[in-house]
Amino acid sequence: MVIPDLEIFTSSLKGNNIPIMKNLAINYDKVTSLAIAGNSGSGKSYALTYLLSVLKNISDLIIIDPKFDTPSRWAREHQTPVIHPHENRSKSDFVSEINENLSKCMTIIHKRQAILFENPRHEFKHLTIVIDEVLALSEGVNRTIKDSFFSLLSQIALLGRATRVHLLLVSQRFDHTTIPVSVREQLNVLIQIGNINKKTTQFLFPDLDPEGIVIPIGKGTGLIQIIDNEHPYQVFPLLCPTYYTKKGIL
């Protein structure tokens, strides 16, 4: 899929579908949470920028960017708030700020649950919490703050689906030190970008033997699995859409 102008393309999309490849689209109404994994320079930011551009029309966004990098530049262009580190502040302060925002999201989930109790057919606008480089947050902070961060992630992942609150997590890897196992089990869109072998796929696709899968060459290529009742459960080779966007974001 080649997209000459990402802005025009995303504004022309109808409904809550996210086109991924020619015959593959994700229905965002059926998504619990998403994960993008890949080593440095593999095209994670490229894939994330595409997803953000599509999601901005179907979801409210909260962006957490520990590296103050591509997502922050994208957010500046699209007037979207970003939580990022500031000078003279410790990492624990930064993760505490993130925890405050995740707590607010939990409050939204509880309010929405109460509305759904009265009216199960109520349709909420999607809310997506985007966290880039999750691994950078969970390493090197004090234990209490990290436990609180993990606990909030778990609650949002477990309770968010019915209330349309989602996590979009990006990390070099998703082992148990990066996110809790309960969060990993709730992910139903799994994307592994870049170098594909048994070692890199062991966290998102533990049962997969990638030997026989032909992976396309290029930036933003890898594997994708969508776990819902619309797609077969197998893992597909992934070729992210090639797109052109505003200068200075990527």
Image (cartoon, rainbow, N blue to C red):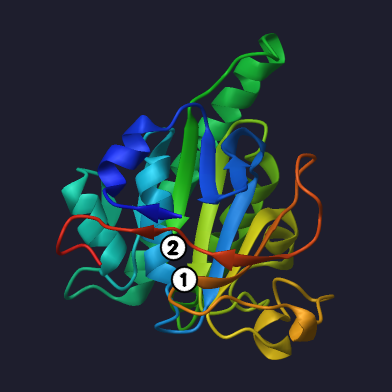
Does residue 100 appear in the picture of this structure? no
Residue 169 x, y percent position in the rendering: 52, 61
Q: Is residue 121 left or right of residue 240?
A: right
Find the distance from the CA under tag 1 to the CA under tag 2.
Answer: 6 Å
Whether 129 is drawn above or below 147: the answer is above
- Say what amino acid the circle numbered 2 marks: Ala
Q: Residue at x 59, y 55 (%)?
A: 34
In this rendering, position of residue 13 left or right of residue 148: left
| Horizontal arrangement in the rendering, residue 89 relative to residue 195 (left or right) | left
Say which amino acid is labelled 1. Gly
**Picture quarter containing residue 31?**
top right
The structure residue drawn at horizontal position 36% and vertical position 39%, both measured from the top left corner, is 10
Name the residue tied to disc 1.
Answer: 220
Other residues around mark 1 within 10 Å, as few (<14) / some (14–19) / many (≥20):
many
Question: Does 80 sit above or below residue 152?
Answer: above
Which comes before the other along the chain, label 1 or label 2? 2
Instruction: Confirm or deny contact between disc 1 and disc 2 (CB under 8 A).
Output: yes
Q: Please give the residue where the numbered disc 2 appears in the rendered image.
A: 47
Which of the 4 image quarters holds residue 36?
bottom right
